[in-house]
Amino acid sequence: MVKHVIIWTLKDTLSESEKKTVKEEAKCALEALAGNIEGLIDIRLNIDMLPSSNGEMMLDSTLESAEALSVYQKHPLHVAAADTFVRPFTATKLCCDFEI
């Protein structure tokens, strides 16, 4: 199995209210991928970070294999969710993929 973890910060130009909306919509869109992409075992978007965090959203997903991760990354449902609800609003992104 493979873990796919991403940490994002949001653009400074967004108000706190806008950031809250972005986080909630991204959470709904990304978590809706569960059961819709073969090889995706679990997906959660954490949006309630403690003040000690330097990221604003963290994706924690589990996939069957590195091949399943590759399929997930190119899958039209994932691309649509990311292009609509995440990428336009993020300033930075860190990604860690590893076998478990």
Image (cartoon, rainbow, N blue to C red):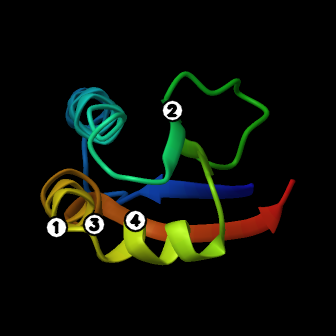
Residue 56, can we see it? no
Q: Position of residue 35 (x, y in %)?
A: 33, 34
Residue for badge 2: 44
Task: Name the residue rendered at 35%, 60% in the picture.
Answer: 11
Nearest to the observer: residue 6 or residue 51: 6
State if disc 2 and disc 4 touch (CB < 8 Å): no
Pointer 3: what residue? 87
Residues marked 1 and 2 touching at CB (< 8 Å): no
**How far apart are the two marked residues, 3 and 4, measured between alpha carbons?**
16 Å
The tag earlier along the polypeptide, 3 or 4, is: 4
The residues tagged by marks 1 and 4 sit, at their Cα atoms, a distance apart of: 9 Å
The residue mark sitting in front, 4 or 2, is 4
Per the model, the C-alpha gap separating discs 1 and 3 is 15 Å
At numbered mark 1, what does the secondary structure look like: helix, strand or loop?
A: helix
Q: Amino acid at mark 2?
A: Arg
The local crowd at label 1, few if under 14, some if 14 to 19, many if 20 or more residues have their Cα within 10 Å, is few
**x and y, in percent, of residue 47 in the image:** 49, 29
Determine the residue positioned at 83% across, 63% down.
99
